[in-house]
Image (cartoon, rainbow, N blue to C red):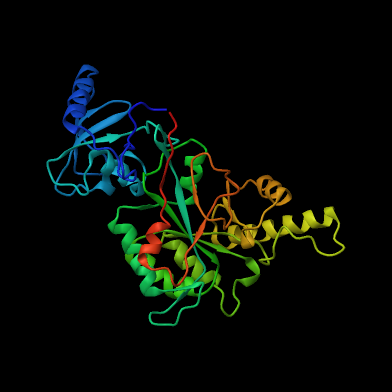
């Protein structure tokens, strides 16, 4: 564990430790000069490289430089802009600033002496137009917009399951206040109501569909899913074929027949998504969140990186990748309740 983690030991563990930028910049400048490294223009930005090492780069920002453009140029993904923002204790970029960009995460597992980072996965099912009465599983458009605005205004980073998989597998770090948005079942309201709100706020979500529901009266169509996928905001992943509880054996069903049925429940929606949308398959959502040893073994054998339940809670880097926790969001959750669902750090004395 790092002796000087970015996560502070304070009453508010969600805030990263501010960096002494002047001292660190001076060290990096000396490092860059001692190594004889080149200065010059930053790739794909109007910023200028002041110094670079294998672990850090110092840039002088231009008038058009943004945190996202820096993350895209140096971290390979603009959604990682919070890493730069938190490391430098800034919320926006001004021309002429000198910023330090960490190229390698010092603590990929995000485990610190005072606790560890966790990632909440929020789950929605249906959505309703503004002003419609409350149905437990149908969040109205106005409430959904308020929730996305809360994430934006409080500096949460909405990440993808691929990023979470890399985090759990120890391949990459993620921003300190990361969250994932998911929508289960594949109701048409995900396209009619949720998708326009997601576009307005530029936030990503994963829709888990069960293939027998696609094209049904209240279900999404392939054309609608293609449109959403083309926006690069929406990922589509499998939620079984029939949405049956995969842990229940049918009356008179043999163990062999049960396992083959489960394999088809996993295989059919996966192949349909690959064939119709051309998307890589990486995360399986268990209907009703139900799984057992047989289901987990079949999902693992199908090369899924992740699997999701509906057990409430957030996920650390050492979570079981095929039994991730998710927290459901309901129509009567006000913004204070929503905020309580965003557990991003567990305070535990690990020394």
Q: How many marks?
A: 0
139 shown above or below 286: below
- Indicate the position of residue 82 as horizontal and vertical percent values: 31, 46
Q: Which residue lies most toward the top here?
A: 34
Question: Which quarter of the rendering shows the N terminus?
Answer: top left
- Indicate the position of residue 92 as horizontal and vertical percent values: 20, 49
Task: Name the quadrant containing residue 351.
Answer: top left
| Residue plotted at (48% across, 70% down) | 190
In the picture, measured across the screen, residue 186 lies left or right of residue 58, that is: right
Q: Nearer the viewer, residue 21 or 329?
A: 329
Q: Nearer the viewer, residue 274 or 132?
A: 132
266 shown above or below 25: below
In the picture, measured across the screen, residue 113 lies left or right of residue 239, that is: left
| Residue plotted at (38% across, 71% down) | 143
- Indicate the position of residue 305 as horizontal and vertical percent values: 58, 46
| Residue plotted at (65% across, 57% down) | 290
245 shown above or below 171: below
């Amino acid at each position: 564990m790092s002796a000087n983690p970015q996560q502070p030991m304070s009453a508010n563990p969600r805030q990263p430790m501010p960096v002494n930028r002047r001292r660190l910049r001076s060290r990096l400048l000396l490092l860059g000069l001692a190594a004889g490294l080149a200065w010059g223009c930053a790739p794909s930005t109007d910023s200028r490289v002041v110094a670079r090492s294998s672990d850090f780069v110092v840039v002088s920002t231009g008038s058009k430089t943004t945190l996202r453009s820096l993350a895209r140029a140096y971290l390979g993904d603009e959604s990682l802009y919070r890493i730069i923002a938190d490391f430098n204790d800034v919320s926006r970029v001004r021309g002429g600033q000198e910023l330090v960009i960490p190229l390698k995460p010092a603590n990929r597992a995000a485990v610190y002496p005072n606790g560890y980072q966790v990632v909440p996965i929020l789950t929605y099912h249906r959505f309703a137009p503004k002003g419609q009465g409350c149905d437990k599983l149908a969040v109205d458009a106005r409430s959904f917009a308020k929730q996305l605005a809360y994430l934006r205004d409080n500096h949460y980073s909405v990440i993808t399951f691929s990023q979470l998989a890399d985090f759990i597998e120890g391949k990459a770090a993620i921003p300190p206040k990361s969250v994932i948005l998911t929508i289960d079942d594949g109701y048409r309201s995900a396209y009619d109501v949720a998708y326009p709100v997601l576009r307005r706020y530029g936030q990503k979500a994963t829709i888990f569909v069960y293939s027998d529901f696609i094209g049904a009266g209240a279900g999404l169509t392939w054309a609608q899913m293609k449109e959403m996928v083309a926006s690069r905001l929406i990922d589509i992943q499998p939620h079984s074929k029939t949405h049956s509880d995969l842990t229940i054996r049918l009356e008179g069903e043999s163990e062999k027949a049960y396992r083959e049925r489960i394999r088809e429940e996993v295989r059919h929606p996966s192949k349909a998504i690959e064939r119709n949308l051309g998307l890589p398959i990486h995360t399986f959502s268990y209907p009703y969140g139900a799984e057992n040893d047989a289901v987990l073994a079949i999902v693992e054998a199908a090369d899924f990186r992740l699997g999701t339940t509906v057990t409430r809670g957030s996920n650390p880097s050492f979570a079981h990748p095929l039994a991730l926790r998710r927290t459901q969001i309901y129509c009567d959750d006000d913004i204070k309740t929503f905020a309580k669902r965003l557990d991003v750090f567990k305070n535990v004395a690990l020394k």
